[in-house]
Image (cartoon, rainbow, N blue to C red):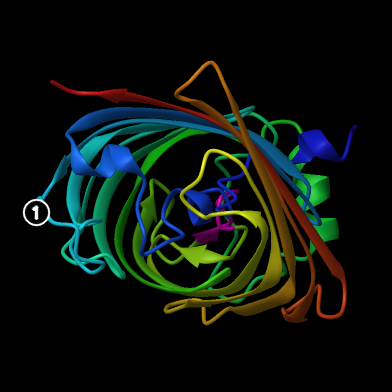
Amino acid sequence: MKRLLTVLGVLFTCAPIFDAAAAEKAPEAQAAHWRVETALRGRINRSGVGTKSSLGYRVPLWRSSHLLLKGAQVEAGTELALSPASIEPAVFFRVTPISPILLGISAQHLRWFGAFGNLSHLPGHRPDWSPDVLHARSWKRNVGQSGTGYRLVAQAMLRLKLGPVVGLFDTHYKWIGAEIPPGASFVPAAEDLLVARRDRILTHKGDLLYFVRGRPNGARFIMAGLHWEGHDTRVTEVQRQILGGIVGWRTSWGGPWHMTLAGIAGVYTVDPYRQGQPYVGISLGLERIWIGD
């Protein structure tokens, strides 16, 4: 439990897989609708816990039954991520011009409370930011301070479906910054990577999923598959890769309410300090759809 509280939180990103997994879309994609989603997410090594909620309004681009067009839509909305040491409101805009492709942008304001060693900075762009160092700083008094920052994200996702098999390839390019001295660096909990005062992060993710029961856009399903992700910071030159398996289960009750439980278990194949060590992430999410007139 003590180790769990050493981290600010997590924006573990396995849950969006189930929101955008299929080229084939649910019936509500043919009408404008509101969507609200909230998820409790956590990970082990580095341990963390947090919540992320979003409210969006989706409008279909085409009224067509064609496979490539019936999932086309635009969505705009707000998000709010909370952790024991930070609050991160955001706005986002996403467009699906054709069903296999999703493009998005978001702007996020970061505010740290000064708890658990954050916001704190490390000297230079090549400091020791090993797990032991970060753990010690999390419990050291007068290390954390309140502060603000930003995160801008551009996203592109390719989604392919063949029968019960779904393939996803997702790329994020992030611009991130915080109020720390010039030349210093810090470790934001969401990324868990060493970044400079003003830095950029390129992230790739790939998933190959098999739906044992149900469909990706269905109210109920069980799926399993392979997961890979890679991260690369520009200024601090940190690289990380994770390879593992992913499982997911979705159910529904009361009509438009959906609950999704997902988990990733893998290993750090590339990392400055954790190479060969295990990685575990979980997400429990609730989603509600309101169909417009």
Query: Which residue is more in the foreground, 176 or 208?
Result: 208
Q: What segment is highlighted magenta in the picture?
A: 185-191
The kind of secondary structure the magenta stretch mainly shows is loop
Q: Is residue 103 magenta?
A: no
Residue 94, compared with residue 85, is above or below; it is below
Percent coordinates x, y for residue 102 in the rendering: 28, 63
Say left or right for 32 vs 131: left
Query: Which residue is more in the foreground, 15 or 89?
Result: 15
Q: Is residue 189 magenta?
A: yes
Which residue: 51% across, 56% down? 17
User: Extreme front residue here?
Assistant: 65
Q: Secondary structure at mark 1?
A: loop
Percent coordinates x, y for residue 182 in the rendering: 38, 61
Which residue: 37% across, 54% down? 177
Say left or right for 30 vs 82: left
Which residue: 42% across, 79% down? 234
Percent coordinates x, y for residue 230 in the rendering: 57, 78
Residue 115, compared with residue 25, is above or below; it is above
Residue 88, compared with residue 180, is above or below; it is above
Q: Residues within 10 Å of mark 1 (few under 14, many from 20)?
A: some
Q: Which residue is mark 1?
A: 62
Residue 254, compared with residue 162, is above or below; it is above
Q: Quadrant of residue 186?
A: bottom right
Which residue: 26% across, 67% down? 67
Query: Which residue is more in the foreground, 269 or 39?
Result: 39
Q: Mark yes or no: residue 87 visible.
A: no
Say left or right for 23 vs 5: left
Say left or right for 49 vs 64: right
